[in-house]
Image: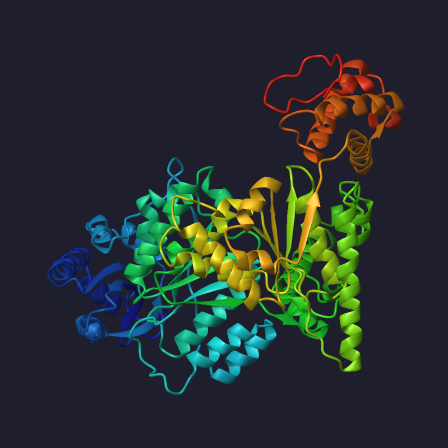
Amino acid sequence: MIYLRYDFRWKDYKSLGNLSKERKSEFEMKYALSDIRAMNERFYSDFQKRGTYITCVTDVTDCEIVIYAAVDIHSLDALLYEKEVSALFHDCDMVKKMEVTIEEYKREISRDPYDTYSRKIFDKLRIDYRCGFFDPFPFKLDEEVLDYKSLSKTACKRRAKEILASKSFYEEMERIYAKENQKIYMGHPVHYLISAGDWGAAKDMYELLIAALTSNRRLVSNRVAILRDITKRAYWDDRYKQVIQAAEGGAVIIELKSEDGMGRFATDFHEFTKLTGLLLEAQKKDTLFIFVEITGKSLKDNDAINNILTKADIIQITEGTGTPKQAENYLLELVKKVDFHSEDKSDVLEFLPKAESYLVTDIFNAYNAWYGSGLKNHVYKAYKEKKTFQVKMTKVESKPYEELQDMIGLTQVKTVTDQVIAASKVLRVRERMGLQTESVSLHMMFSGNPGTAKTTVARLLAKILKEEDAIKSGQFVECGRQDLVGKYVGWTAHIVEEKFKEASGGVLFIDEAYALVDDSNTYGAEAINTITQMMENYRNDVIVIFAGYPDKMQAFLEQNEGLKSRIAFHLDFPDYTADELTKIITLMSKSREYQIEEEAIAYCREIFEGAVCGENFGNGRYARNVLEQAILRQADRIVNAAAGREISKEEICLLKREDFRMVSQNGKKEGRIIGFAC
């Protein structure tokens, strides 16, 4: 349905001042209360018979008539609607016509004193969804009618340049404005997934996208329903379904957020995406679906995403980048819309960090930072000089190579890292000399027990290789069996390839890779075979690192001889000794600005000598647990001993022997340490 408002006036109406009392009386008599009620009853009766449109007179004042209408987008009768309505009010001129939101339509129909059928109308139109204090929506709903003028291809490209549109955006503009397309509405051939780091950036993208589609007659309605902050209640709350169904003819924009917002159980967001996919499948012809993915907060479960992406043809549009000058222009355009009663808003440029290129997200981050400062400088000036409430943070420049070298042990890992860096440098020299530069395979296997820093090293390695130009992007993609194996036949190969694409130019880290070995079905084997093939296809673009326990990783390699031959480096992560763990806990405490007294350090070594003999020894994780529990005991000790006196900095940073205990490795409480014998 399209929801419309029409305003009519008497033909000889010029102004309220020069219309005679007699003519006003004549108008009021013709459209008296009883006549309007009878007219609306007839409108409802016609709607029950035809179901194509429903008209309701809502207001009659000073020789003007206000009409609200809901018109079916599928009905040919809708083309005749305005002629029929004009014929009913043949002695009046139509002075205004505008599309309205469903919310406005419901509000105006409900308050109309002449109509007694509003609730029945809402039931018929399936818009009888309400939000109350005790029954709020399981989502945030915004609805608006976008007021667009016809936008030429040139104007669209000009605007796209202003918002730093990406290549994927320009490609879709070419398709929308293609001459071979018919400029007629027949349904939606594709839908969209917008990926951006900020909602403001996504909003600029979808508004221009809708403007382009409207200009090419690809949309019947300019009404947009926006659903954000969706919770797990959405999939069993009928109002989620009703809002999307009511968006027919226009567009519905759905923010896909992390499954964390869906509650603790995976079934919640699986059911949500399943329902959304079914709604997409049912309405994809006449409702434009635009999904918005905020980078870093999107759904990560492939099965859940596929519940949506497999139901229609979806084009992904990513945010773009721009030069410093383009970024400045975009930023200045954003601040023009803010009324701080200040002509000069160029101070916003101070919030844009120096860089050679900018993501759109960087620009919106600068805008948001400036806005907060602007409130103090231009609106709430009493806070202008108030700085004490600000939290000052010192940003330490990340030096991943030094961080790796400072880690305790890991001699073999450090040696291999140096070899890879050296090979990369030689490769660049060969390029400058015009020699053959085929790179060697850098796929690796990390074998070690829990807590031996396999994941930490993999992340550092990605950063180090990026700094040394051994890889292009430094992208680090971490996954496990649940991220690689599909639920159904044929899904696994596609999921695996998508992971390789995601890790393009960086590292694909497959943790607990042995879990892919599964005797219950062939999907794990399919994943291993596909990974083996992708390792060759993406040989020069993705470094694959497999990680897991030593004995289980050996069984994993035996599953596929081709896989084994493609792994160039087999790195062992040995268990830490008591001395190494003592050094680790000392470094950990230092990084948290704590100091361990000498007697406590000696006691920690005793704890670790006993721990390394344990069956479920946690290595570095165990040392971290010992430190964290010591910090909790120290806090309790200081608070109890303070008794209102002032606590010194030295005291609050010192960890004593009495703060440390042996931590259980099997869930049972450890008793007092008597001795250590392996």
- In the image, is 64 to the left or to the right of 198? left
Q: Decide which of 402, 362 is in the foreground and name it.
A: 402
Q: Decide which of 92, 78 is in the foreground and name it.
A: 78
Q: Residue at x 34, y 75 (%)?
A: 14
> Is 590 rendered above or below residue 199?
above
Q: Is residue 583 visible?
A: yes
Q: Decide which of 491, 439 is in the foreground and name it.
A: 439
Instruction: Report x, y in % for residue 184.
Output: 31, 80
> Is 555 rendered above or below residue 647?
below
- In the image, is 257 to the left or to the right of 384? left
Which quadrant: the N terminus?
A: bottom left
Q: Residue at x 22, y 75 (%)?
A: 79
Instruction: Report x, y in % for residue 453.
Output: 69, 42
- In the image, is 117 to the left or to the right of 597? left
Which quadrant: the C terminus?
A: top right
Quadrant of res 655: top right
